[in-house]
């Protein structure tokens, strides 16, 4: 860690409780009461020790930043000489007020939840915020009441190993969230040393590689069975069936369809613009609409009573994810709603000559370098419109009418 990270101006401006590193084992400690003092943290015989230098200030009994650094140097010199320095401050007496609880190293659970509250404004949606809290609360029970500076690699492995193969995606996200919590604790001065949840050069040496794990793919309806399924689905006259039809025809994600609002559609241009805030990759996505998609939208317009194209049972709320899953299960068991994206992709790859790049673009997947994407942007939409029109024909009839070369 670089030394001399603090300045007198910065020390004076810091208000929030916590430990702020200056580097070289010196920290500024800010209490909940607003008082400030300097401490030194160092590890001796694999145990972390702490020395209080004294309160920050310019009075005779106080320590300026420069004076605190000098004391730090003396302490570290003694440690390097194999000595254990004595505390600098006077021993506590009965007349001394109890130490502010904000001086104590926080427990993992409390610190994690406080961190989520501080950073959640940067999350894409409410579901993401809830997932952060839920995964940490569910899987980190063994370290929930443990100080953040005492969490070890063994603790992290004990949490991850039981779910690393059976719940690969959840385990990966959980590891990343634990790493961020512990990194934040280090920045606040509550930890030192390597992060026990780090992947590169650490856990990657102790856990199987991700590509060798069961990835938990979404079960997809084989594309050869889609026309028969569509016939049953199209015979239903419900909002849920209309939403599922629209999802299949656009190869969109469930959340994108269920959260679709009327303002996102340009019916004259037959275009659906999904804003970046609702896309998984955080980029705006343009979806060309086939005639069947337009027919669905016209039907939904006739019963329109909400800003959502596919409103749910509750007022001013979209359909729930479970509604589509239940509908699919009632018609065809063993498959997932998300799996229809794989159905579309398999059809593109096996029954057409459409390019991989344009098929992936239909799914809002990023392909190629920024230069390649910029080059393709001009004709990508029209190429994708041809793909979605061909997909509509196959879905309704079972016939794949054209390929990329014929469409060019």
Image (cartoon, helix red, strand yellow):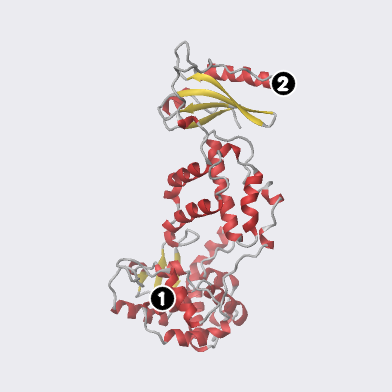
State how far apart marks 2 and 1 are (Cα). 71 Å
Element marked by disc 2 = loop
Residue 82 - label: 2
N-terminal of the two: label 2 or label 1?
Answer: 2
Residue of label 1? 243
* In front of the other: 302 or 144: 144
Which residue appears farthest toward the front when viewing the image? 94
* In front of the other: 306 or 53: 53
Quarter of the image with the C terminus is bottom right
* In front of the other: 324 or 265: 324
Please state the horizontal and vertical placement of residue 380, each as a whole percent of the image.
Answer: 50, 70
Disc count in the image? 2
> Can residue 316 be seen?
yes
Please state the horizontal and vertical placement of residue 339, each as a whole percent of the image.
Answer: 54, 73
> Can residue 379 be seen?
no
> Which residue: 48% across, 52% down?
133
Element marked by disc 1 = helix
> Which residue: 68% across, 46% down?
202
Quarter of the image with the N terminus is top right
Please state the horizontal and vertical placement of residue 84, each as a whole percent of the image.
Answer: 66, 20
- Tell me the crowding category of disc 1: few under 14, some 14 to 19, or many 20 or more residues within 10 angstroms, Cα based: many
Q: Nearer the viewer, mark 2 or mark 1?
A: 2
């Amino acid at each position: 860690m670089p030394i001399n990270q603090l300045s007198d101006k910065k020390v004076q401006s810091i208000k929030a409780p916590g430990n702020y590193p200056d580097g070289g084992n010196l920290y500024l400690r800010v209490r909940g009461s607003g008082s400030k003092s300097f401490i030194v943290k160092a590890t001796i015989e694999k145990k972390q020790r702490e020395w209080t230098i004294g309160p920050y200030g310019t009075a005779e009994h106080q320590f300026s930043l420069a004076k605190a650094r000098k004391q730090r140097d003396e302490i570290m010199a003694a440690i390097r000489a194999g000595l254990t320095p004595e505390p600098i401050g006077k021993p506590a007496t009965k007349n001394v007020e109890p130490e502010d609880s904000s001086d104590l190293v926080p427990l993992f659970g409390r610190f994690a939840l406080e961190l989520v509250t501080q950073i959640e404004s940067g999350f894409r949606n409410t579901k993401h915020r809830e997932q952060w809290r839920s995964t940490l609360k569910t899987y980190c029970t063994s370290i929930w009441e443990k100080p953040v500076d005492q969490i070890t690699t063994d603790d992290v492995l004990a949490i991850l190993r039981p779910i690393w193969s059976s719940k690969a995606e959840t385990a990966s996200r959980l590891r990343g969230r634990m790493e961020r919590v512990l990194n934040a604790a280090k920045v606040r001065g509550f930890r030192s040393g390597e992060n026990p949840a780090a992947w590169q050069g650490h856990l990657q040496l102790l856990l199987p590689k991700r590509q060798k794990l069961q990835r938990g793919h979404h079960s997809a309806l084989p594309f050869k069975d889609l026309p028969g399924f569509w016939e049953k689905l199209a015979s239903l006259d419900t909002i849920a069936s209309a939403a599922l039809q629209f999802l299949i025809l656009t190869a969109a994600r469930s959340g994108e369809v269920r959260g679709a609002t009327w303002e996102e559609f340009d019916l004259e241009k037959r275009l659906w613009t999904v804003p970046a805030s609702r896309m998984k990759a955080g980029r705006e996505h343009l979806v060309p609409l086939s005639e069947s998609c337009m027919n669905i939208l016209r039907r939904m317009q006739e019963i329109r009573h909400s800003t959502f194209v596919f409103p749910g049972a509750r007022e001013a709320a979209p359909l729930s994810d479970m509604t589509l899953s239940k509908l699919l299960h009632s018609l065809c068991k063993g498959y997932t709603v998300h799996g229809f994206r794989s159905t579309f992709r398999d059809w593109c790859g096996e029954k057409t000559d459409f390019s991989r790049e344009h098929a992936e673009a239909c799914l809002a997947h990023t392909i190629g370098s920024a230069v390649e994407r910029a080059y393709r942007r001009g004709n990508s939409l029209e190429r994708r419109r041809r793909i979605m029109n061909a997909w509509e024909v196959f879905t309704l009839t079972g016939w794949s009418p054209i390929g990329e070369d014929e469409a060019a």
